[in-house]
Image (tube, rainbow, N blue to C red):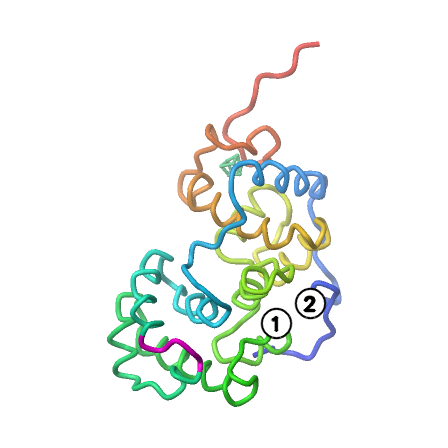
């Protein structure tokens, strides 16, 4: 649920009285990041899903665990409860049993049953394709809502997870760890049509190359302009 009623920008992010300034050259680095990552990665979400309902539930289950562990439980979950109406009246103990491998299974079971109930009660059993509506659902914050919008509805959404926070700082796109501020700044630097793809590709790059402990800068397609790179290409000859 939204925490304040502060006005929102065009990207949907809350307006701040004093937004932190983006680092010098951030816009150009953002453009290069969009361009280079698009050559390497698809704009793909690694959570298996067939519709916005499944994506919503899978995204909630993905908190504090890997997409792989979510993908292991969702086939049984969605076979048993294919719609919001089915999940809304599910036996919590049965849901807990199915989703247990994803961790925090009691809280997650409560949340996904509550989300299903809210979808049935207020949205005709369908996931709404609007940020403001999504933020009224239990357990749905801006990160989850942006994934649902971008991946489920093809509505531009820049989801900021732990990988996006880390990479956007290492790349000098932002100098803040506040997810809403990162969303607001990055979405001002790149066109809306790139928001979803950039977020998904930063997540893939963060999982595969720019990992938290020891980034593999020597293999990174961004290493010639990344301010945090541990390798430098040979200077161009005159
Ligand atoms: S050069 Fe290194 S720090 Fe910069 S994005 Fe690539 S892997 Fe991360």
Are the residues tagged 2 and 1 within 8 Å (C-beta)? no
- SS type, badge 2: loop
Q: Is mark 1 within 8 Å of ligand 1?
A: no
Residue drawn at x 56%, y 79% as measured from the top left:
1
Total labels drawn? 2
Q: Quadrant of residue 63?
A: bottom left
Between discs 2 and 1, the one toward the N terminus: 2
Q: Residues within 10 Å of mark 2 (few under 14, many from 20)?
A: some
Where does the image place residue 33, in percent across and percent down from the top left?
Answer: 61, 40
Residue drawn at x 49%, y 50% as measured from the top left:
203
- Nearer to us in this view, 26 or 192: 192
Where does the image place residue 133, in percent across and percent down from the top left?
Answer: 61, 78
**Mark whose residue sits in front, 2 or 1:** 1
Q: Residues within 10 Å of mark 1 (few under 14, many from 20)?
A: some
Residue 129's disc number: 1
Magenta highlight on residue 83: yes
What range of the chain is rendered magenta?
A: 80-84
**Location of the C terminus (image quadrant):** top right
Residue drawn at x 51%, y 26% as measured from the top left:
231
Q: Which residue is mark 2?
A: 12
- SS type, badge 1: loop
Magenta highlight on residue 157: no
Distance from the alpha carbon under mark 2 to that under mark 1: 13 Å
- Nearer to us in this view, 197 or 30: 197
Residue drawn at x 26%, y 71% as measured from the top left:
100
Magenta span: chief secondary structure: loop
Where does the image place residue 20, in percent across and percent down from the top left?
Answer: 70, 56
Please identify the residue farthest to the top as the structure is shown.
238
């Amino acid at each position: 649920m939204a925490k304040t009623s502060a006005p929102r920008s065009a990207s949907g992010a809350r307006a701040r009285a004093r937004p932190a300034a983006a680092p010098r050259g951030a816009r150009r680095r953002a453009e290069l990041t969009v361009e280079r990552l698009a050559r390497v990665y698809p704009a793909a979400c690694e959570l298996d899903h067939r519709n916005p309902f499944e994506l919503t539930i899978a995204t909630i289950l993905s908190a504090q665990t890997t997409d792989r562990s979510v993908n292991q439980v969702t086939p049984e979950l969605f076979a048993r409860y294919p719609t919001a109406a089915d999940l809304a009246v599910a036996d919590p103990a049965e849901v807990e049993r199915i989703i247990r491998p994803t961790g925090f299974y009691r809280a997650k079971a409560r949340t996904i049953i509550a989300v299903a109930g809210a979808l049935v009660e207020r949205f005709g059993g369908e996931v709404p394709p609007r940020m403001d509506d999504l933020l009224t659902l239990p357990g749905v914050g801006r990160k989850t809502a942006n994934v649902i919008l971008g991946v489920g509805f093809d509505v531009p959404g820049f989801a900021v997870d732990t990988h996006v926070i880390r990479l956007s700082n290492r790349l000098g796109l932002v100098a803040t760890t506040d997810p809403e501020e990162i969303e607001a700044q990055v979405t001002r630097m790149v066109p809306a049509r790139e928001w979803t793809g950039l977020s998904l590709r930063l997540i893939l790059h963060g999982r595969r190359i720019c990992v938290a402990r020891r980034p593999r800068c020597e293999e990174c397609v961004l290493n010639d302009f990344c301010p945090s790179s541990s390798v430098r290409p040979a200077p161009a000859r005159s």
